[in-house]
Image (cartoon, rainbow, N blue to C red):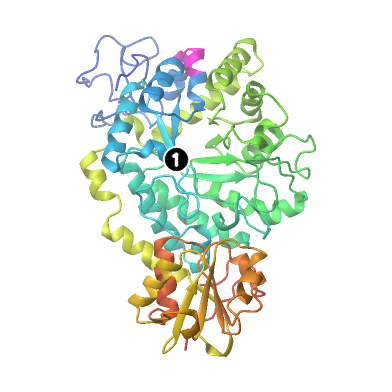
Amino acid sequence: MRVPRSIVLAAVTAVTVPLAGCGGGAPADRGRPSGGAAPGAGAARPAPSAATPAPGAWIAGHVAEMTLEEKVGQLFVPTFASAADARAMIKRYRVGGLIYFPANFAGGPAATARQSNALQQASELPLLLSVDEEQGLVSRAPFLTRFPGNMALGATRDPQDAQAAARITGTELRAVGINQDYAPVADVNVNPANPVIGVRSFGSDPALVSQLLTAAIGGYQSAGVAATAKHFPGHGDTATDSHTGLPVIPHTRAEWERVDAPPFQAAVRARVDAIMSAHIVVPGLDSSGDPATLSKTVLTGLLRQRLGHQGVIVTDSLQMQGARRKYGDGAVAVRAVNAGADQLLMPPRLATSYGAVLRAARDGTIPRARLDDAVTRILRLKEARGLFRGTTADPARADAVVGAAAHRATARQIAERAVTLVRNDSGLLPLRNRTVQVIGPRGDALMDALRRNGVRLAASPATADVVVLTTLNAGAATAARIRSPGPKPVVVAALGSPYDLDRSTGAAATLATYSSGSAAVMALGKVLAGTVKPAGRLPVKAGGRPFGHGLTYQ
């Protein structure tokens, strides 16, 4: 990767130690080698001596030497349609990062690693290559090991599971050159009608969410991937999707302190790399009517000063209507920076947003100190995740690491521990010595799992003893579907939202897997067959049962 001559060598050895490959020369007037540079993509760091400065000591000097255009570019994390499109944005705007979506993963792990390398080589500073990879419902890379997601982890109640899942996902992401994940979700889901969070949350209890969130942060960061807790100040109690509208959260300041704040406080204590803002209005925290992303009261007052977060603040996608409803795209970007955001994620039109921020920085609308602070935090994050020591991904290693057998085994084990038996009237389960009909989403996959575990499948509905009905976020339709098989006993298995079980009073037995992925469906088959005993406990109130409820077999 090309490295600007002005960058100070991170972990530079004392001037008495020659730097191979550097320009040499006399010390500059700021006391560092002229032409010295922080290592870029693929570069190795020289062995430190006793006089080595602290990591990141070079950053303040480098920020002081950056042009205004370079500083503004570091704030932006756009999408890209192709590698050529990305290189053009890197060259024109000197963006600080890029975000991957499914179309950017064509060709598999090795091809993705090569693409990441090419993008890093095109940039003068290491890029934060990011992705929304939460596991479970929100997953972008089609080839990564599939875990059942956060609410399933909430059902296991095991921080070791949360840490292992995050570490494996982080390891696979870093193997393909991705170094920032917009995960884990810190929202406490207390609204069963929440259309945007739901099973993306670890659960409805702030203490449980805090515990598992902390473990996940450690897992991602131990794998060399920047973790991002989201969505501040808390998106767990809304019936509006911020992708399409502007949610208003009715929590008072006291309710926020009790319900929403604890996971973010835990994230700050865990020294999370970044926290993402939410496009939500919380009148109890800020009466301006502005979404949190554009609120200095929320981002600077609460997150920076009240909670003490010293890492990066990143906006949620600026393409979402929750951010764009009140102001134009250029004004949104400027207001977000002045509110305290450091990274501007997915501007709808990069040229518009970049131009607006650049003009605001030139005329003082964005104070120079605020801009320098944002750039400094971004460079510190890159330093903390080792990007100045090298970013090159090994394509051969990517193919070997991604989807490794041990990773898939961990996903299966977590899925099995998550399955929650909510009701089992008259001991209907397990389904030994019964003939079973399966109807509903993922029915074929569940039948295959049952068959593998020795359960007899009905050749026709008339020959079935029991009907297993799967649901996938069916909501109110669940009750009617339970009645459709007639008088035969029905087992309802909620493969998505466990709140489907709130409409399952007519069922003889109910279970929740929190995921419709292959690992979760196979785990459900084992539990129904009795091969595995159910061990999960509800991470939310559902099916008429309280938080923490869970049955097992004798």
Q: Identity of the amino acid at label 1?
A: Val
Is residue 7 covered in magenta? no
**Could you say where residue 492 lies in the image, as x and y percent from the top left?**
56, 74
Residue drawn at (19%, 20%) of the image: 20
Rendered view: 249 above or below 435: above
Seen from the viewer's position, the closer of residues 131 and 485 is 485
Taking the image as shown, residue 141 lies to the left or right of residue 49, namely right
Taking the image as shown, residue 497 lies to the left or right of residue 177, namely right
Residue drawn at (73%, 48%) of the image: 249
Question: Magenta stretch mostly in which secondary structure?
Answer: helix
Rendered view: 172 above or below 429: above
How packed mark 1 is, by other alpha carbons closer than 10 Å (few <14, some 14-19, many 20 or more), is many
Seen from the viewer's position, the closer of residues 416 and 312 is 416
Taking the image as shown, residue 220 lies to the left or right of residue 472, namely left
Read off the residue under disc 1: 131
Range covered by the magenta-colored residues? 64-71
Q: Is residue 171 visible?
A: yes
Residue drawn at (41%, 72%) of the image: 447
Which secondary structure lies at badge 1?
Answer: strand
**Considering the image in quadrants, where does the N terminus appear?**
top left
**Could you say where residue 417 lies in the image, as x and y percent from the top left?**
44, 71
The answer to which quarter of the image holds residue 506 is bottom right
Seen from the viewer's position, the closer of residues 237 and 126 is 237
Is residue 66 covered in magenta? yes
**Could you say where residue 220 lies in the image, as x and y percent from the top left?**
41, 48
